[in-house]
Amino acid sequence: MDINIKDIIKNDGKLTEGVYTITGVSGLLVTLVPSGSGYVFELREENYKSAQDFKLESLGGDVWRIVPVDAEKYCFDIAGCSDKDGAKLICYQKNNTNAQKFKIEKDGDAFRIKTGASSYKKYIKSAGTLSQTSAKDDSTLWSFHMI
């Protein structure tokens, strides 16, 4: 069920804890995909399956961990905790490093996901390869729809 973005934002313009689908500017959703002995994240068409559901867990202040509902031992992670452009967004076991911390800031009717690996100076791309970039353009806009 999609909820209007205004219904899921607190008065201060931030998301609340809960389960969401996360949609990139391309209209594709972040999807948890089995790969070998683990998982990867890919952008895929909406399939109404729980592999596209993610839990926002507050780590205090405005810092979040983003956890796939189907694999709660894992979360979003910037590979190698790199601060470089092009560093891949991977699915990795929770370890509480900066690679797994994100700030989600409102930007108009959308959001940008800032990476802890870059000291919150870079963003996750929402089109093409899921990776980190310093570009603050349309390719880093996301929408969150509460389940």
Image: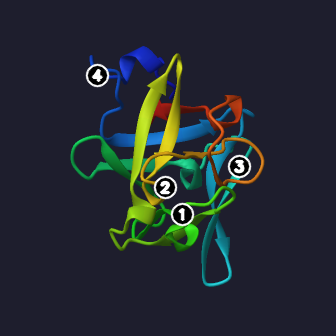
Q: Measure the alpha-carbon separation of dots 3 and 2.
A: 22 Å
Snapshot quadrant of residue 47: top right
* Residue 63 percent across, percent down from the top left: 32, 47
Of mark 3 and mark 4, the one earlier in the sequence is 4
**CB-based contact (under 8 Å), mark 3 and mark 1:** no
Q: Which residue is mark 1?
A: 78
Hey, what amino acid is under mark 1?
Ile
Q: Residue at x 36, y 31 (%)?
A: 15
Q: Position of residue 141 (x, y in %)?
A: 61, 32
* Residue at image mark 4: 10
Q: Amino acid at mark 3?
A: Leu
Question: Which of the marked residues, 2 or 1, is nearer the chain's N terminus?
Answer: 1
Towards the viewer: 138 or 7: 138
What whole-number distance in Å separates the C-alpha atoms at marks 4 and 2? 26 Å
User: In the image, residue 20 lies at what x, y percent?
Assistant: 46, 40
Q: Residue 99 location in percent, x, y?
A: 45, 64
